Image (tube, helix red, strand yellow):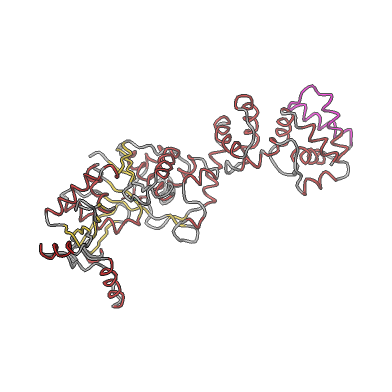
Amino acid sequence: MTVRVRIAPSPTGNLHIGTARTAVFNWLFAHHHGGKFILRIEDTDLERSRPEYTDNILAGLCWLGLNWDEGPFYQSQRLDLYKTAVQKLLDQGLAYRCYTTPEELEALREAQKARNEAPRYDNRHRNLTPEQEAAFKAEGRNFVIRFKIDDDREIVWNDLVREKMVWRGSDLGGDMVIARASEDGVGQPLYNFVVVVDDIDMQITHIIRGEDHIANTAKQILLYEALGATIPEFAHSPLILNMDGRKLSKRDGVTSISDFQKMGFTPEALVNYMTLLGWSSPESTQEIFTLEEAAKVFSFERVNKAGAKFDWAKLDWLNSQYIHHMPVDKLTDLLIPFWQEAGYQLDGAKDRPWLEQLTAVIGPSLTRLVEAVEMSKIFFSETVEFSDEGSKQLQQEGSSAVLSAVIAALESQPGLTEATAQEIIKQVVKQQNVKKGLVMRSLRAALTGDVHGPDLIQSWLLLNQIGLDKPRLNQAINS
Ligand code: GLU
């Protein structure tokens, strides 16, 4: 058997972290088994689906490296298939038209509530006579198509994550709506139904999705049976929770992959982190791996049942690991869009060499790519802003004299290198009879406006190269 799995996002919002993590587990499982990973866009909800969300979803999956083998397939282009399947169930007497009005359903719900019962449809139109149907039609009532669910049916499956699952037909809310009214009398098919038709048609062998779909699985198993198809395996992955243990939501700040991208996470770190959201490697100390490496050892035996807490500190740590181990030219490629977005003027080919040097200087201090904007501000503006500590440092006794001596030494240097920069510092210490610390701190404050920051000598070399070091030193002396 060839493993065939799918990710089936609804384009009613940007690619969500939960959907992306489900995609990761599907991808890992497919690659572990040398199977196929299929992408299906579930865009049957015409009111809420938007093409820009589809674009966001496709771009997000590509950015994360979650390439798919087949698709994308669009449900909106497959309506005929679903209608044929609805008709088949109608013909077999497994589904029927229900003419209950929204007001009648509301009254039913109210009555159930008053009796402290769970809301459910009471299957009242299951056995209408042709005369009754004709009378409802004559009244101009709309219909939905319902699939018969027997209350005393027991639905059992062996979930690859949650093990044995048992549901009763009576827990499923009565005969389920599989299609809404439409002109042709067959109806506009709904989610729970079209998913099954598609999964059968696409020969999906394993359905891997979030545990919020468990109740759907119970219903869908009945549909597989009704449509005469083989029931696939199911794996329900745990939900992603915030640190308070509640389901991660918009209130927690970011939830879509494009938000994480804007915040400066690298795709490799984010996808690595998502792999660990609910799964752990058999080599439990190993936390950093590529998708391919994780795929080699991935199995549902190591997927937790309990919800996975989203830990920002861990994601930040992973991100910094990826950034710190990245070759400078690749990191420069990743930083350029952030600098551009911040409005810094860059001339691609001309600026590239010093941008790579800048990257080498700030790279080791970065946790998120976006931090490069603030950290490299001093290299992109003519003048520097002084922090309180920076100004204080420049007011220290001897600071101005030290800086004047540095300028004088610079005048006599044809070009600055790491060795000459060190030599200048040594000279000034001797000449001014001051501690090296004073020279270093004053230089840093003058050049960067602050007392903390990236490597001083490297920053100085860079500022020298772009002609900003002498103006900075003069600005500091005169401030
Ligand atoms: N379209 C569904 C969703 O976005 C997924 C359906 C499924 O995986 O079965 O939640």
In the image shown, does 205 or 372 lie closer to the viewer? 372
Q: Is residue 220 left or right of residue 291?
A: left
Q: Is residue 305 above or below residue 23?
A: below
Q: Residue furthest left?
A: 130
Return the x and y of residue 299 as percentages of the image width and height.
Answer: 34, 46
Q: Residue furthest top?
A: 414
Residue 365, located in which quarter of the rendered image?
top right
Q: Is residue 380 above or below residue 171?
A: above
Q: Is residue 368 left or right of residue 376?
A: left
**Is residue 286 at least partly visible in the picture?**
no
In the image shown, does 383 or 272 lie closer to the viewer? 383
414 magenta-colored: yes
Return the x and y of residue 399 as percentages of the image width and height.
Answer: 85, 41
Return the x and y of residue 180 as percentages of the image width and height.
Answer: 25, 56
416 magenta-colored: yes
Q: Residue furthest bottom?
A: 115
The span shown in magenta is: 405-432
Secondary structure, magenta segment, majority class: helix
**Is residue 408 at least partly visible in the picture?**
yes
Q: Quadrant of the N terminus?
A: top left
Q: Is residue 90 left or right of residue 68?
A: left
Q: Is residue 40 above or below residue 245?
A: above
Q: Is residue 20 above or below residue 429?
A: below
Q: Quadrant of the C terminus?
A: top right
In the image shown, does 259 or 404 lie closer to the viewer? 259
Q: Residue at x 25, y 52 (%)?
A: 188
In the image shown, does 215 or 205 lie closer to the viewer? 215
Q: How many marks?
A: 0
Return the x and y of residue 447 as percentages of the image width and height.
Answer: 76, 37
